[in-house]
Image (cartoon, rainbow, N blue to C red):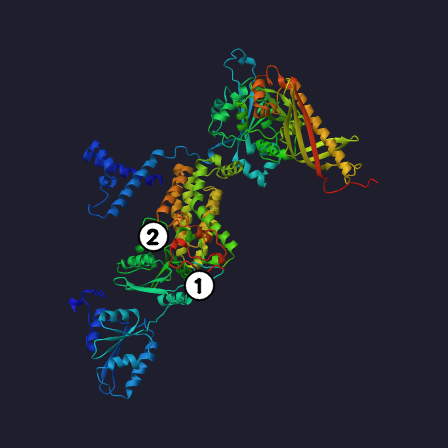
Amino acid sequence: MAGIISLTFAWILAKFVVQCHKQGFFAFTASLVTKPVSMIMKLERSETSRGETIMIKRGVSYLCLCIGLLMLTSCWDRIEIDQRGFVTGIAIDKAEQDEETDSKSSSSKKYVGTYQIITPSGLKGSGGGKEAGGEKGSASEGNAFFNISSTQNSMSSLAAGLAAQTSRAPYFEHLKIIIISAEVAKSENEFADVLDFFLRDNQMRRGIVVLITDGKAKDVLDVKVKNEKYPVAYIESILKNIKYSSFMMPEVRIGDVHEQLLKKDAFAIQKISADKEGISLSLQGSSIFDGTKHKLVGFLSGEETQGLNFMTGQVQGGVVETTINGKFIDLKIDHASRKIKVQNLANDHFKFIIQVNVEGMIGKSISELDLNETETIKKVEEHFQKEIEMESQKTIHTLQKTYKKDAIGLGAFLHQNHYKTWTKVQTDWDQGDQIFSNQVEVEVQAKVKIPEIGIVNENEKTS
Amino acid sequence: MLQKQQPLILNQEANVIHISVSVSENIESIKQYLGAPNDLVIRQFHISMDNHLFAMIGINGLIDIQIINEQVLQPLLLYFSDKACISDEDLFVRIENEILPSFDLQNVQTLDDALLSILSGDTALFVDGFDQVLIIGSRGGESRAVEEPETESLIRGPREGFTEDIRTNTALIRKRLREPNLRFVTYKIGRRSKKEVVIIYIQGIAHSDLIKEVQRRVESIDIDDLNGSGTVEQWISDSFLSPFPIVANTERPDKVSGGLLQGRIAILVDRDPYALILPITFSSNIQSPEDFNQHWLISTVTRVLRMVAAFISTFLPALYIALLEYHHGMIPSKLAFSIAGSREGVPFPAVVEAFAMEGTLELLREAGIRLPKQIGQTIGIVGGLVIGEAAVSAGVVSPIMVIVVAITAIASFSFPSYSFAISLRLVRFGIMVAASVFGLYGIILAYIMINIHFVNLKSFGIPYSTPFAPLFFSDWKDLILRAPVTFLTKRPQMMQTEDVKRADKE
């Protein structure tokens, strides 16, 4: 194909040269501009031929020139799909500052980056059971992906460094997850600096999920996975389970993080933790970030995250547990919503009311309750309301007293709805005077509705 | 003899050959013009007491001998067996008016016409003493029966197809339209072959300018022989550079009659079982006569399917190239990994792979057509199974590529219009080149170029992209959506028909 094109091109070039030689270069190029190409190329035989054929011949010669132009571009960015190193996950840790690097700490490398790169041929066999890949966990793992680490000063030099270590250059368009260790996230402004590469580079998508881990980020990528073929796919699947667990935060994409980084509000990012043995992962909990310094201030537990989710209206499903007469009873959440109201803005005392509306069905009941009676349902609903209110208050307490950061978004609410008040307090909201922790009272009013009690009435005859 | 050796070209204004009064002279000159071939049958006989000379001339194999025997020879011989020849003056008129029971009789004045009729399969009756010839319609000879059209078979619909015989073909159309305004305009085209070309339209429906234009173009054909309808199509087409068919061809009389009622014009060529329908638009290519036999929902879905097929057969290999060479990020991750895995170890870039496989497919298709039907299946097995399977297991091409090629092939076979499918095949290769050089950008450029071409293209004055581009909303009822037949009460607006209504509403 290319041969034919280049031959055509060469032929035109030859014509060109010959004509140039005859007429002199400048005269020729001048005539090129003024006359149709075909006239110069002497493509047409006679002057008297019909206008139609002149047009056609002119068209043909232009076409030849255009094809020749194609040679100038010549597929410069063509890369075969099987020559890409698909990076699906990146873990970023702080480099250990010890031993010999101590003396010249300024030049010491700052980050350890771990890339999870897919080995496509390994993915193929293990699913169908054709290969004997499934026999040992490590064997199949080794086939589907490999993790590769490097220690560098920045993310882009990390990419460059790893390109020198792998046969296939890292390719980020299928990057799904960035895991950042608490160590990196804790240092001031470093979090944003690390993410800058992932926001700026043109191979990056804004849908990459950002996760914060309390341990070493590398350990998360090293986890031995069960259902999926590589850890990142495993984590991705867990992320989708937000409909079944309210202990997880909804996924935070790098685009969302970027928005938060541009604002001055505190925010929360999902937390991931791997156990020491590298066998299991958990996405329960969340991490709280400072709005101005953009650094990690601490983590919320699973329960606290549930409270936070209720208050931010991000609950999509999950289970609320409460006790009646010392026995556990569960509510399976169908959907939940919340509404913020401001009750008092005067006298340096802010009172917010967060109304949480939850609808769901009984997930697990106990024998003593006769759910056929409306009274009992009312009672159960009240129990759940109290539970939700209590949990939310716990979260509020942690946020106000321990972290002093407004991750609920009350500040943002003021900003949007009571701008005049906000302009007065915004500098001291969760910085400086700490208005959020000292002068804000939040009341949570939960309203639980149980329209259905499940597909059976009772589990055993009680009376 | 020698000076008359130059070939005779019939019906030239300059030198009309007149019929001689002497029969034997006429026979001599006919023999001379035709070179006395051995399939020329000359029957000379003397009738009645005064031995009046008669001669009948026809060509063996073209004439139906039975007609001649029953309708000419028998009555003539019987009539004159006991009579003396009547006065010379009215003999000819008598034969024509009283004696011959033949249905198709013609009186011809020049030898040119007589020769032409003889060559067409009629029989000429020469009578001594008259410079006229009686032409007795006796066309017969071998011809194919009306069969089911092989290239356009339907599940539900008539099984009749055109044959090579133009009389049969016109009759097939007449049988469908008992319409007094149905017009057959016959031309004898071809300097040497003098083939009959019939322009068919319905007076009062087809736009008169369109009729005139088609007639003008058909009259402008000047060539020794028309190969068939394809040659006519190319002679009268608007643009010879466009790969897209702007004249439809069909073997189905029902399609022709449908087209006529929509205000289109049909052209039949003798010895060709394909009728031409014109003008057509892009949308005609995705419509099949079967659409009107099925429930409207089913037809609509089928048409959507054909649109999708058009897209697939044009763009799929190009998309494959573009996505695999340039835009790996646009493939869903898991699919990308699986494609990358299946391409592991394939030595060629996707472009070469795609061109090789598409080329192989075209070769297979071409080979399959040329071979006798019994061997055709073998080609399918060798091509499909052996080459496909072997190429994959040898690691020369990736399995995904085989899937792409297969889907493309299936999609391109799903068109009711074969000629449109071929042009899409052609365009496909162009788009593949664009994709391999510029990626998706190239595909979009090519797509834009095709669209520009579409809106520029005209079929006998009707823009090819109607009713999309010059917008005729009322025609959308029979476009991709095929509205229930009770809703289709108007003829296509884009055809500018003289009679607009097909039915009065309600």
Kind of residue at badge 2: Gly
- Residue A353 pos. (x, y %): 66, 26
Q: Residue farthest to the top?
A: A103
Give the quadrant of residue A441: top right
Q: Is residue A282 visible?
A: no
Q: Nearer the viewer, residue B168 or B182?
A: B182
The residue that appears at 34% across and 52% down in the rendered structure is: B461
Kind of residue at badge 1: Glu
Give the quadrant of residue A409: top right
Answer with left or right where residue B93 lies relative to residue B301.
left
- Residue A288 pos. (x, y %): 61, 22
- Residue A370 pos. (x, y %): 79, 39
Give the quadrant of residue B396: top left
First along the sequence among labels 1 and 2: 1
Q: Residue farthest to the bottom?
A: B82
Q: What is the secondary structure assignment of the residue under circle 1?
A: loop
Answer with left or right where residue A265 lies relative to residue A454.
left
In this picture, is A273 found above or below B87?
A: above
Label 1 marks a residue whose chain is B
Residue located beneath label 1 in the image: B148
Q: Residue B461 carries which label?
A: 2
Please tell me whether mark 1 or mark 2 is closer to you in this view: 2
Q: Nearer the viewer, residue A408 or A267?
A: A408
Q: Nearer the viewer, residue B222 or B375?
A: B222
